[in-house]
Image (cartoon, grey):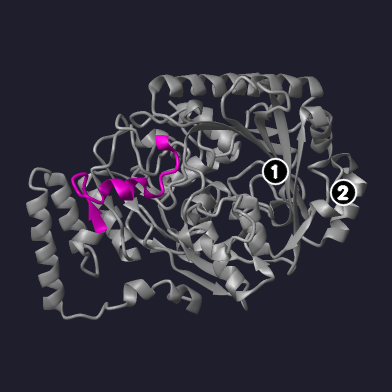
Amino acid sequence: MKHTTKKLHHISEKNSIMGSSTSLFLTLNTILLFSSLVASQPILEKLYQCISLNSDLSIPFSTAFFAPDNASFNSILQSSAQNLRYLLPSVPKPQLIFTPLTENHVQAAVICAKELDIQFRVRSGGHDYEGLSYMSEMEQPFIVVDLSKLRSIAVDIQDNSAWVQAGATNGELYYRISQKSKTHAFPAGLCPSLGIGGHITGGAYGTLMRKYGLGADNVIDARIVDASGRILERDSMGEDLFWAIRGGGGASFGVILAWKVRLVPVPATVTVFTIPKTLEQNATKILYKWQLVAENIDEDLFIRVIIQAIDAAKKGERTIQTAYNAMFIGRTERLLQVMDESFPELGLTRKDCTEMSWIQSVLYIAGYPKNTPPEVLLQGKSLFKNYFKAKSDFIREPIPETGLEGLWKRILEEDSPLIIWNPYGGMMSKISESEIPFPHRKGVLFMIQYLTLWNDEKPESEAKHMDWIRMLYNYMASYASMFPREAYVNYRDLDLGVNKNCTSFITSISWGSKYFKNNFIRLLKVKTKVDPDNLFRHEQSIPTLPLMNQRTGKIMIH
């Protein structure tokens, strides 16, 4: 194993040499303590005993296991949960939260969950849009394995790489890179509080995607606990499994422990801007032109469009604002040339542009106030916690102005809508649809994320906003990609379909084809090979195939 990999094991190795009698004494003591606290919950007692006996190091009960009657349970459950809908009292809660301190503890958790037939969820950053990393409506009881204490990062500038554990956030990785070099970066998400473990399993896009592709396109190795409880790296897991975990969705094939990622070059100075345009400022025509140029504009330029309803100049009225939020890999002078040639309609001027370092641009795009120190990225705190519902679309043909006007009408009917258009093209068009499971490549002009947000837990509020976003999604059907209508797996949407009681793979095609297109069949085969008992499962996990011809590799349907 390389030296950088070894750095990730410092937690496991520290204090690992101890007398066997001392270790046994500690283990027995903690088992007795746990037994007294959960005498009425024998399955949890068995789980704790099993994890302790399968761990190389004793686990301090009070800092690693949290049952619902523990004073810290709610704060830990809520600590990284992004969607408040899944923290409501009516939503099933885990019977236990386990926070492993070492990779071996994760191994033990997998081995014991399988041995005791306990359903478990794995959480790295808590950003799953449908709460699938910390809630389950499929099976009860269940536990959560929270990886938040596994967050070591080892940056190797000479090798242009970094090993990062699954519990670390994007922001932490970006910060650690910036401390070693001002001209290196990693092309992952725009939100710094995303847990890197789950984020990359869905693709991971950001401001550098048109230049360098997705985060998942830039993974060169990984460490994973498989269904047998083994820790595997790329060489030992094989190329099929390594392919599947880079974009095939989280928590279907194993527990990601760490990624080895490729760092990419950036200049010491990049340029950012945000230009708002309302309907009164010709927003419709400008956005139509953006659709024509977004895919083909210089690959160093990422311009997303944030669409919201705002108060109009006339009291009591609302209008649509489209905000062009951009990052350019270069200086203002060349950016102005690119915009003058490709998108003069936006009217970008020198005074609209701000030059800064790449790490400062991370803060800018994430919405932090000016002059916020980059150390804030180490806090791993989300700026976005709401009751919300989201959906996604991929657009392959420009939406006509009449279609945009219909969209404006519907946005103005909602209290707090948020629509984000992210440009494609550049490197995204050069990578094959089958290179990794993420298939949305050549021909995609842009991706749309639809969000509706509200701030109370009333059932009638949720029903109202859910009805609105489903209506909007139906309206957009004629403008979206077709056969299938593509969707982004990291914007998880249970409206597309769910696994119920070991649903057959036939029914899973309804959502699997939208997320993965033709790659879904290969994902099914990999799943069946590496996790035939479907240990790693959730409402939209990749299911196993019922029967496969071992000689031909073809699916057999009876």
Picture quadrant of residue 476? top right
Q: Is residue 461 above or below residue 325?
A: above
Residue drawn 29% across the image and 32% down it: 89
Residue 540 spot, x, y in % from top left: 44, 36
Q: Which residue is mark 2?
A: 339
Q: Which residue is mark 1?
A: 441
Of residue 117 and residue 461, the one placed in the foreground of this image is 461
Residue 459 spot, x, y in % from top left: 39, 22
Q: Is residue 401 above or below residue 117?
A: above
Residue 130 spot, x, y in % from top left: 44, 36
Q: Specify whether 515 is left or right of 256.
A: right
Of residue 15 and residue 374, the one placed in the foreground of this image is 374
Whichever of labels 2 and 1 marks the residue nearer the N terminus, that label is: 2
Q: Residue placed farthest to the front in the image? A: 315
Q: Is residue 302 above or below residue 60?
A: above
Magenta range is 64-84
Q: Amino acid at mark 1?
A: Arg
Count residues near mark 1 (Cα–Cα under 10 Å), then give few for <14, some for 14-19, many for 20+. Answer: many
User: Is residue 56 shown to the viewer in this render?
Assistant: yes
| Distance Cα–Cα, label 2 vs label 1 | 24 Å
Q: Is residue 90 magenta?
A: no
Residue 390 spot, x, y in % from top left: 54, 33
Disc 1, SS? loop
Residue drawn 63% across the image and 72% down it: 160
Number of the label disc, if any, that sits on residue 550 = none
Q: Which quadrant of the figure contains the C terminus?
A: top left
Q: Amino acid at mark 2?
A: Met
Q: Specify whether 334 is left or right of 435.
A: right
